Amino acid sequence: GQQLNQSPQSMFIQEGEDVSMNCTSSSIFNTWLWYKQEPGEGPVLLIALYKAGELTSNGRLTAQFGITRKDSFLNISASIPSDVGIYFCAGQLKGAQKLVFGQGTRLTINP
Amino acid sequence: KAGVTQTPRYLIKTRGQQVTLSCSPISGHRSVSWYQQTPGQGLQFLFEYFSETQRNKGNFPGRFSGRQFSNSRSEMNVSTLELGDSALYLCASSSRTGPYGYTFGSGTRLTVV
């Protein structure tokens, strides 16, 4: 089936640093989504991307839909302690009703 | 407005038993999807319901089933539980079929012993 390769699997950074993570796939996706999940909770949508090449920001978060439709990245600028969590990319294939999720990037921040 | 409500939050069952999980979507949302989350396999799609009809199904055995009621509330059932069914089961609702505007609930943590 379709797979998303998300990297890195984990990141250990200092507060204030910028963060970058990405997802790649051999399949072409119609939509890319980025979620954050905290312990004991379900994923929360951060950014949704619907067009190839689209660059979208949400506060300190910026995500881009790759021009080939096979990849996406998420950047977090000036990280703060509440950014800690697991970040997931998810893609939707054209005509499909489900999301395919990456394996997640666990972000840990040292104050 | 209230979010997606899943009950119960935690559940412990014995191998061979069956279990029913419940999901109440956001008011007005007619689409409900279910996902299984495990450390090894990550988040995997189980099925989606829209207006009481199953619209799509993931690659899970027939022991996993679901349904949706006229008020959009949904239940999923797992029969003949196996140890490998231990997971966080997440429900997401949307105002239309497909993942647009998905809002996830906090999940039901199922442990099979």
Image: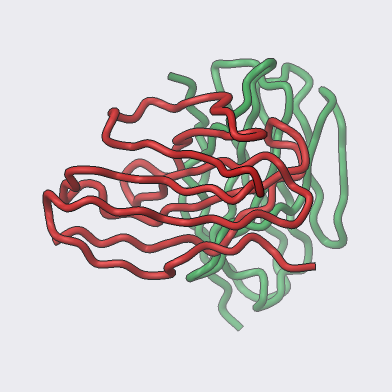
Residue at the spot 78% in from the left edge and 47% down from the top edge: A47
Image quadrant occupied by the N terminus of chain A:
top left
Q: Nearer the viewer, residue A99 or B10?
A: B10
Q: Which of B103 and A100 is in front in this view?
A: B103
- Give coordinates of residue B25: x percent, y percent: 65, 54
Q: Residue furthest bottom?
A: A111
State the hue of chain A. Answer: green
> Would residue B53 appear left or right of B17 to someone viewing this image?
right
> Would residue A109 appear left or right of A83 to someone viewing this image?
left
The quadrant where residue A22 appears: top right
> Would residue A18 appear left or right of B10 to someone viewing this image?
right
Residue at the spot 73% in from the left edge and 16% down from the top edge: A68
The quadrant where residue A77 appears: bottom right
- Give coordinates of residue B37: x percent, y percent: 41, 49
Q: Which of B66 and A13 is in front in this view?
A: B66
- Give coordinates of residue A27: x percent, y percent: 58, 16
The quadrant where residue A107 appears: bottom right
Image quadrant occupied by the C terminus of chain A:
bottom right
State the hue of chain B. Answer: red
Does residue B10 lie above or below B68 as drawn? below
